[in-house]
């Protein structure tokens, strides 16, 4: 079974019940704290404070610790790709995926043709 790192987009699509993402309901979710912040924020804007708090509490158990090495690599990755306007959360998730033999699950067009990515929109 493949293991995935879920970017914010992928988690939001799971929450929304997008049928294209239904096959990922059975795999462990792995995210960073930055993804959790984005997920809770988007939920707050779209569904209100109560739902945002519920989602935050539900998904915080999936947050992984990030090493300093991975953080520094993510900073370098973002700098090398600054023309692509990648978020810190996505850069961190992508590098964490690479460093931990995970597939980066995303719908972000900027990652569409990068190695180690499963793109779904």
Image (cartoon, rainbow, N blue to C red):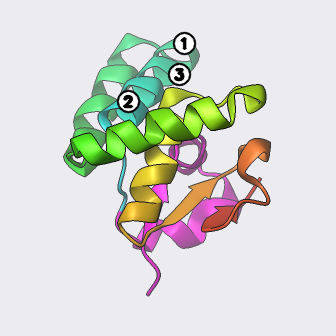
- Other-residue count near label 1 (Cα within 10 Å), few / some / many at <14 / 14–19 / ≥20: few
Query: What is the CA distance from the residue labelled 2 to the residue labelled 1?
Result: 17 Å
Determine which residue is flagged by label 3.
42
Q: Which labelled disc corresponds to residue 34?
A: 2
Could you tell which of marks 2 and 1 lies nearer the N-terminus?
Answer: 2
Task: Work out whether residue 100 or residue 21 is closer to the camera in this orientation and state it.
Answer: 100
Residue 8 visible within the image: no
Please tell me whether mark 2 or mark 1 is closer to you in this view.
2
Task: Work out whether residue 45 or residue 63 is closer to the camera in this orientation and state it.
Answer: 63
Q: What segment carries the magenta color? A: 1-28
Residue 40 visible within the image: yes
Residue 113 x/y as whole percent: 79, 60
Q: Is residue 23 magenta?
A: yes
Residue 16 x/y as whole percent: 59, 42
Could you tell which of marks 3 and 2 lies nearer the N-terminus?
Answer: 2
Query: What is the CA distance from the residue labelled 3 to the residue labelled 2?
Result: 12 Å
Q: Is residue 10 left or right of residue 63?
A: right
Determine which residue is flagged by label 1.
45
- In the rendered image, which quarter is residue 58 located in? top left
**How many numbered tags mark residues here?**
3
Q: Main SS type for the magenta part?
A: helix
Residue 20 x/y as whole percent: 70, 62
Q: Quadrant of the N terminus?
A: bottom left
Task: Please say if the residues under marks 1 and 3 sit with CB atoms less than 8 Å apart.
Answer: yes
Q: Is residue 52 left or right of residue 91?
A: left
């Amino acid at each position: 079974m493949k293991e995935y790192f879920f970017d914010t987009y992928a988690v939001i699509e799971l929450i929304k019940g997008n049928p294209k993402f239904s096959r990922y309901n059975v795999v462990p979710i792995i995210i960073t704290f930055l993804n959790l912040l984005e997920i809770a924020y988007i939920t707050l804007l779209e569904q209100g404070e109560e739902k945002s708090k519920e989602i935050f509490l539900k998904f915080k158990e999936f947050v992984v610790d990030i090493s300093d090495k991975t953080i520094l690599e993510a900073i370098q990755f973002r700098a090398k790709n600054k023309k692509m306007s990648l978020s810190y959360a996505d850069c961190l998730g992508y590098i964490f995926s690479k460093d931990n033999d995970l597939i980066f699950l995303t719908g972000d067009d900027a990652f569409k043709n990068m190695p180690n990515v499963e793109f779904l929109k």
